[in-house]
Image (tube, grey):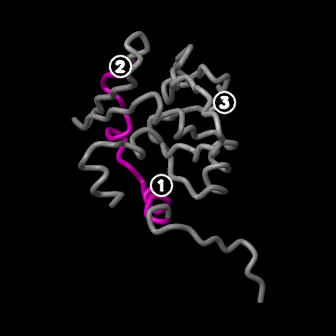
Amino acid sequence: MSHEGIRIVRAERARLEDLEHAQMPPNAVTPKKVRVKKTEGTGVEIEWNDGHRSVWSFEWLRNACPCATCHEDREKTNRLPGEAKAKEHTLLKMYKAPARPLEVTPVGKYALKFKWNDGHESGIYSWEYLRRVCRCDGCMTKQEL
């Protein structure tokens, strides 16, 4: 009997993956208003057509990058989207500039793309992905995170 392909994940990750496969109604993943607060350096706010409101900091969004490379790295280190990578323990701590976008561009009518100050720019943040990783109290309770 082969056990190839079997993964052991934290309960939080298993719940999140189950939620990823659930169908969401179109008005829940269609933004009514999108605010990218690039000048203020604070983050992104979205008001959805179903009346819901989501807010993310740029730091959280950078750590939740949906590109394949970042997704695989999170899986290897058993981190959830938005969870920062553990910092290396060194004698002298190096300064790391906070994550902020240098450019933000819409991708069709379905997503946003960020060019981050660390040079990373391959993640496409679809409206559905952003709604699924909403950080509001109600969504966090549903996700039990």
Q: Secondary structure at mark 3?
A: loop
Q: Which residues are magenta?
A: 14-36
The picture quadrant where one finds residue 16 is: bottom left
> Label 1, label 3: how many angstroms apart (C-alpha)?
21 Å
Q: Which mark is residue 5?
A: none
- Whether pointer 2 and pointer 1 mark residues with C-beta atoms closer than 8 Å, the reply is no
Is 111 one of the magenta-colored residues?
Answer: no
Q: Residue at x 58, y 27 (%)?
A: 96
Compared across the picture, whether 142 is left or right of 68 comes to: left
- Residue 138 position within the rendered picture, expressed as x and y whole percent measured from the top left: 24, 49
- Residue 33 position within the rendered picture, expressed as x and y whole percent measured from the top left: 31, 22
Which of the two discs, 1 and 3, labels the residue nearer the N terminus?
1
Q: Which residue is mark 3?
A: 122
Which of the two discs, 2 and 1, labels the residue nearer the N terminus?
1
Q: Residue at x 75, y 75 (%)?
A: 4
Compared across the picture, whether 128 is left or right of 116 comes to: left
Q: Secondary structure at mark 1?
A: helix
> Label 2, label 3: how many angstroms apart (C-alpha)?
21 Å
Graded by Cα atoms within 10 Å as few (under 14), some (14 to 19) or many (20 or more), the crowding at tag 3 reads some
Q: Which residue is mark 2?
A: 35
Q: Which residue is mark 1?
A: 20
From this viewpoint, which residue is outermost toward the front? 91
In the image, 117 versus 14, the foreground residue is 117
Graded by Cα atoms within 10 Å as few (under 14), some (14 to 19) or many (20 or more), the crowding at tag 2 reads few
